[in-house]
Image (spheres, rainbow, N blue to C red):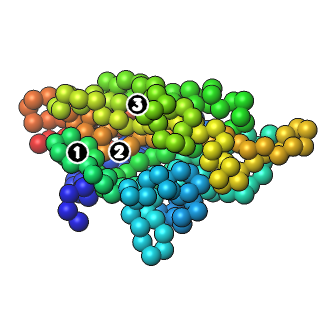
Amino acid sequence: MGAGFPFYVGELAYLVRALIAFFLDSARKNGYLEILPPLLVNADSALATGQLPDKENMMYRTDEGYLIPTAEVPITNFYRNEIFTEADLPIKRCAYSACFRREAGSWGKDVRGLNRLHQFDKVELVQWVLPQESTQALLTLRSHAEDLLKQLEIPYRVLAICTGDMGFPHAEQYDLEVWAAGQQRWLEVSSCSCFTDFQARRANIRYKTSSGNLEFVHTLNGSGLAIPRVLAAILENNHRGNGEISIPSVLHKWLPMTKIHF
């Protein structure tokens, strides 16, 4: 396996499982229906969400297709060729999945440890909305991801991404970064994006207006959240200097312990 494919053992394995449960339960309370997606998609699905051809060198390819870099890919394609009514929208879905990224060209001290992995766990939030509602929907989706960090009591900041730094499918994007005290640096844990009708056109996802016309929906997604860097921030910000790391109280109900011992 090599570097980039971590093992979590004992208390760390419990903590990862607790984070996944917390993220999914919070998404459910915010109106997202959970989906358990496949981990392998075909080229058409990756093309629809903008992974192909832009990020082909970052994806693991098999004889049958591509390992997903994010659950956004299979979830967005769940409604390929679908026609909704206005009353159907918005639709909100969430999913936990393993994610696979080759991270071609990544090297150096900033990608060591849990900072950048070839396989990692993530909960994804996806929405299909009416075009006139997508701007506000993005702010709401971002608030869902932010609230997780507030409850975990992790220092974080929000970045509005400029056009030149966004991928070509994106129309608007916010990144959430957590402070890793041990590394003295900010780590991205969520990217919340609105694609307007870019993905909907590629996947042919439409809705019928009240006047009977067919229009493309707008799609949005964001990490809610990515596990490894959140885990790193918890460990680094809650180290008490006595061989113990305090676990955020919001996670206690899923765990057999309240502290990790090193």
Which corner quadrant of the image does residue 79 belong to?
bottom right
Q: Amino acid at mark 2?
A: Ile
Q: Amino acid at mark 1?
A: Val
Q: Secondary structure at mark 1?
A: helix
Mark 1 = which residue?
Answer: 111
Residue at 14% in and 28% down: 240
Q: Secondary structure at mark 2?
A: helix
Mark 3 = which residue?
Answer: 176
Side (left or right) of 216 relative to 245: right
Q: Residue furthest right?
A: 211
Using the numbered discs, state the Cα–Cα distance from disc 1 to disc 3 in whole angstroms. 18 Å
Is residue 153 visible to the viewer in this orientation of the structure? Answer: no
Q: Position of residue 121 (x, y in %)?
A: 37, 51
Q: Position of residue 60 (x, y in %)?
A: 38, 63
- Label number found at residue 227: 2
Residue at 59% in and 54% down: 48
User: Local crowd at mark 2 within 10 Å, few (<14), some, or many (≥20)?
Assistant: many
Which of labels 2 and 1 is toward the front? 1
